[in-house]
Image (spheres, rainbow, N blue to C red):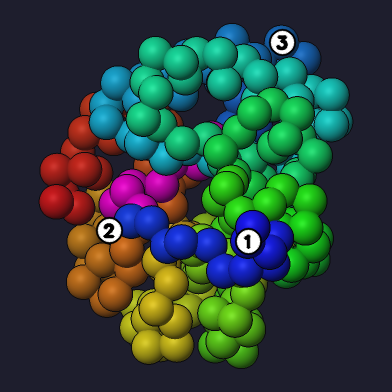
Amino acid sequence: MSSPLSAPILQPLPRLYAIVDRACFGAGPDVAAPIAAFACKLMAGGVALIQYRNKIGSAPETLSHCRELRRVCYAWPAVRLIVNDRVDLCLAAGFDGVHVGQEDLPPEAVRQVMGNRPWVGISTHCPEQVREADRWPVDYVAIGPVFPTASRANPSPVIGLEGVRSARRLTAKPLVAIGGITRANCRAIIDAGADSVAVIADLLGDPQQAAEEFLRILG
């Protein structure tokens, strides 16, 4: 029997890592349906990996949204669902993994709770954090922000394409780039060494068309 702290088996990441952010859906209490509809359009456009992020709502609200996303995702069985920050809600909603930040539960503790099967990702923002993450039992390492972004109130310093290249040299784990990524700059990020690009803002508007265009550009 494998240890809960053993390194997971690395799996290929889809080129496009879509993030559905609660903050993009207004201040009203009844946004579960619009969030689910948005996710369905992403999946219809070919998205195979979706993270749900809720930095402004309560745990009950986040769980409700996650369960609705899990329900509509049954029509796309190959799609993986990741929740930001919350290991407990990942388990409660039957999600496929959790993404944690530098201030969240450490990956070793996440593995103790979740075991080896669900995906675990970790955010990093500098070479030292990438080196540390490379030793942890995580399935992928996220690096950023690559470009200026409005999705966080107090973002870390921008790392640029050279930051992606540096991260690539420091880890053999799948690498996700995040921060200010658009259809206009995503190909350069893949060429710099990222396996996948995480996108929020440039999927808004017409998510199905945006997803199709991203995937066509990313190849």
Q: Which residue is at the front of the view, 18 or 139?
A: 139
Report if residue 6 is visible in the image. Answer: yes
Label 2 to label 3: alpha-carbon separation: 33 Å
What x and y, as percent, mark residue 188? 23, 68
Task: Label 2, secondary structure: give it.
Answer: helix
Q: Along the horizontal axis of the image, is 58 left or right of 53?
A: right
Residue 20 falls inside the magenta stretch: yes
| Highlighted magenta segment, given as a residue range | 13-21
Label 3 to label 1: alpha-carbon separation: 42 Å
Front disc: 3 or 1? 1
Q: Which residue position holds label 1?
A: 2
**Does the residue at mark 3 contact the one at mark 1 (Cβ under 8 Å)?**
no
Q: Which residue is at the front of the view, 187 or 135?
A: 135
Kindly identify the amino acid type of the residue bearing the numbered disc 3: Asp
Q: Quarter-wise, where is residue 48 in the image?
A: top left
Disc marking residue 57: none
Q: Which residue position holds label 2?
A: 186
What x and y, as percent, mark residue 105? 80, 60
Q: Which residue is at the front of the view, 40 or 55?
A: 40
Kindly identify the amino acid type of the residue bearing the numbered disc 1: Ser
In terms of secondary structure, what is the magenta stretch mainly?
strand
